[in-house]
Image (cartoon, rainbow, N blue to C red):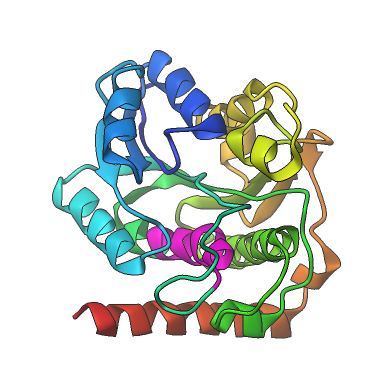
Amino acid sequence: MMKTIFLTGATDGIGFVAAQKLGAQGHRLLIHGRDPQKLEQVSRKIAGAPETYLADLSNLEEVTLMCEEIKKNGRRLDSVINNAGVLKTSQTRTNSNRDIRFEVNTVAPYLITRELLPIINSDGIVINVSSAAQRPVDMKALREFKEMSDMEAYAQSKLAITAWSLAMGREFECGPSIVAVNPGSLLATKMVKEGFGIEGNDVNIGSEILARFVNDPKYSKRTGEYFDNDSGRFAPIHAAATSEIFIDELIKDLDRIIAEASLNFE
């Protein structure tokens, strides 16, 4: 059965291989990238002539415009895969004085999910790419820029996306499924090569699990859960992400950041 899928970060790594796989399976794809030339080149390597959407996910105004364009085109979605992420970058501070790892890995996927929920079919799924690397979140670092190592910022941002994914999955039990997925550790992506200086494991490990969550009801019907592809199972989340006080504070801060971005945009 053909599904309509929106996939962020489709120009590299897991996202690109997943897009090729899903396109070859006959699904209709809407793919995102931030480099117009690269996005155009990649789109020609994916079956089915995917629609392309351009946005820098560290700029919430651009994210909002991208979501508005998707909604304007009138398609309903079966799946949203928030795959784009960043670990190491020369520019760690956004124009809004926040850490780019939090903005791209946590805030932008939250905004995309909130914006697109009205057009996702009730039997659809939102797949948020998480990581085995998760650490307790310094909420001050989410709100405004704070010096920290690449790995510290990345791991905190991935715990945050896991926490809000599970909370939102419980909130919308009657709507589309919402899950967080660790696609596999140290896969052969540009992020791993630049961040750790190693080639990494077969990237198909990650793309295959994303495709499985799109296609297989055994996976796609689960919601408000975390799947760890290193162990091949739905797994307990990091203890720091289970605190209701933390989750409430996180959701409030994400809503505030998005509201402020919306006011600035207007």
Pinpoint residue 9: horizontal percent, then vertical percent: 45, 41
- The residue depicted at 57 percent of the width and 66 percent of the height is 102
Of 206 and 201, nearer the camera is 201
From what the image shows, is residue 51 above or below residue 65?
above
Instruction: Assign the N terminus to one quadrant of the image.
Output: top left
Q: Is residue 222 left or right of residue 36?
A: right
Instruction: Assign the C terminus to one quadrant of the image.
Output: bottom left
Pinpoint residue 196: horizontal percent, then vertical percent: 75, 41
Pinpoint residue 39: horizontal percent, then vertical percent: 32, 33
Q: Quadrant of residue 256?
A: bottom left
- The residue depicted at 50 percent of the width and 59 percent of the height is 104
Per the picture, the main secondary structure of the magenta-coloured stretch is helix
Of 41 and 28, nearer the camera is 41
Q: Is residue 111 magenta?
A: yes
Q: Is residue 232 magenta?
A: no
> Which contiguous range is marked in magenta?
99-113
Of 125 and 252, nearer the camera is 252
Query: Is residue 248 in sight in this rendering?
Result: no
Going by the picture, which residue comes out furthest to the front? 90
Q: Is residue 24 left or right of residue 222?
A: left
Of 124 and 256, nearer the camera is 256
From what the image shows, is residue 198 above or below residue 235?
above
